Image: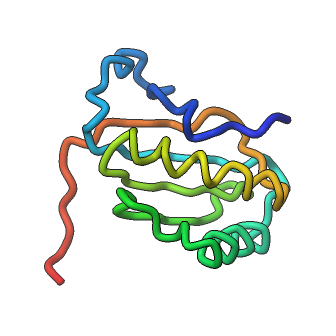
Amino acid sequence: MATISPESATQSTTDPGMSTRDPGMRILVRFTAAPGVTADQYDETIRRLEKSGDWLPEGLEYHVAFKSNGNFRVTEIWDSQKELDAFGERLMPVLKDVGIELSGKPDVLEIHNVIKRPS
């Protein structure tokens, strides 16, 4: 199975009308790893990104990693598609080296609103 890059996440797989998205609009991105990807592989990816100075990337507001139905998943909120794409160029070689593949294109959705409790 081929690795899918964040750069290929240019429109929502749940809303085909999103291809006209404003490239500066905040987005929610949902990645699903291919079967067999482990928490250890994910943790190693984060360690390597931290060591190279690429973690936390500019424009990443939230990053949540979890398992759902036996698959490792990551959901992120980005300030813009442009910042996601820029980080993807640095991330993809690390994912490949660690052996992480995605199960398909990520879902990319425009964010209308985020509400969080005060700090």
Question: How far across and how far down the image is residue 86, in percent?
Answer: 49, 46
Q: Residue furthest front?
A: 52
Question: How far across and how far down the image is residue 102, in percent?
Answer: 72, 44
Question: How far across and how far down the image is residue 2, in percent?
Answer: 81, 34
Question: How far across and how far down the image is residue 17, in percent?
Answer: 35, 15
Give 62 or 60, whichever is nearer the viewer.
Answer: 60
Position above or below: 11 against 55:
above
Position above or below: 112 against 61:
above
Left or right of 37 in this view: 87: left
- Location of the N terminus (image quadrant): top right
- Location of the C terminus (image quadrant): bottom left
Left or right of 50 in this view: 78: left
Q: Residue at x 47, y 28 (%)?
A: 10
Give 55 or 108, whichever is nearer the viewer.
Answer: 55
Position above or below: 101 against 39:
above
Q: Residue at x 77, y 47 (%)?
A: 101
Give 58 or 67, whichever is nearer the viewer.
Answer: 58
Q: Residue at x 18, y 49 (%)?
A: 113
Quadrant in the rendering for residue 46: bottom right
Q: Residue at x 30, y 50 (%)?
A: 79
